[in-house]
Image (cartoon, grey):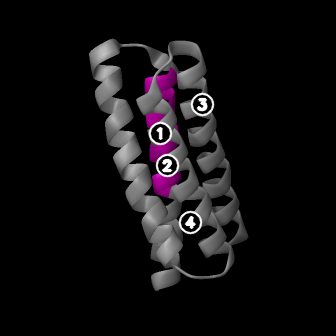
């Protein structure tokens, strides 16, 4: 359980820092708002997973799915690997890890 919580925590920090970086480099306020919002939601989910409550894992799954779809859509439009494809891949890996974790705990 600690492993999954740590993965979600790191993912949340990456998402939040990505939003800040998007604001600094491109002046995108929406990147800042969405990056910080989703990042904080993921960080909160990781705290919940650390407390052994599965709702945090479900929330992190939903956020990872939304972010993965959004970054995949952005990659299809821009064809730039970084950050779009990179974050789509990271989101998919986090979603896979959480799905395996929830499947294992459900049995």
Residue 20, numbered label? 3
Quick check: is 100 in the magenta stretch?
A: no
Residue that carries the numbered disc 2 in the rendered image: 37
Left or right for 35, reference 46: left
> Helix, strand or loop at disc 1?
helix
In-front residue for pair 11/36:
36
> Helix, strand or loop at disc 3?
helix
The image shows residue 33, relative to residue 6, as above or below, that is: above
**Can you tell which of label 3 and label 4 is closer to the viewer?**
3
Q: Is the stretch drawn in magenta largely helix, strand or loop? A: helix
Q: Which residues are magenta?
A: 83-96
Q: Position of residue 16 (x, y in %)?
A: 59, 41
Residue 33, numbered label? 1
Q: CA distance from mark 4 to mark 1?
A: 18 Å
Crowd around label 1: few <14 · some 14–19 · many ≥20 (10 Å)? some
Q: Quadrant of residue 7?
A: bottom right
The image shows residue 103, relative to residue 69, as above or below, that is: below
Q: Position of residue 85 (x, y in %)?
A: 44, 26
The numbered mark, 3 or 4, whose residue comes first in the sequence reads: 3
Q: CA distance from mark 2 to mark 3?
A: 11 Å
The numbered mark, 3 or 1, whose residue comes first in the sequence reads: 3
The numbered mark, 4 or 1, whose residue comes first in the sequence reads: 1
């Amino acid at each position: 359980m600690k492993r999954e919580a740590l993965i979600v925590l790191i993912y949340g920090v990456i998402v939040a820092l990505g939003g800040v970086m998007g604001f600094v480099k491109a002046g995108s306020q929406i990147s800042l708002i969405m990056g910080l919002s989703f990042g904080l939601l993921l960080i909160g989910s990781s705290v919940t997973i650390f407390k052994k409550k599965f709702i945090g894992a479900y929330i992190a799954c939903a956020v990872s799915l939304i972010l993965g779809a959004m970054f995949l859509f952005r990659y299809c439009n821009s064809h730039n690997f970084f950050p779009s494809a990179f974050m789509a891949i990271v989101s998919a890996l986090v979603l896979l890890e959480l799905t395996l974790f929830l499947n294992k705990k459900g049995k």
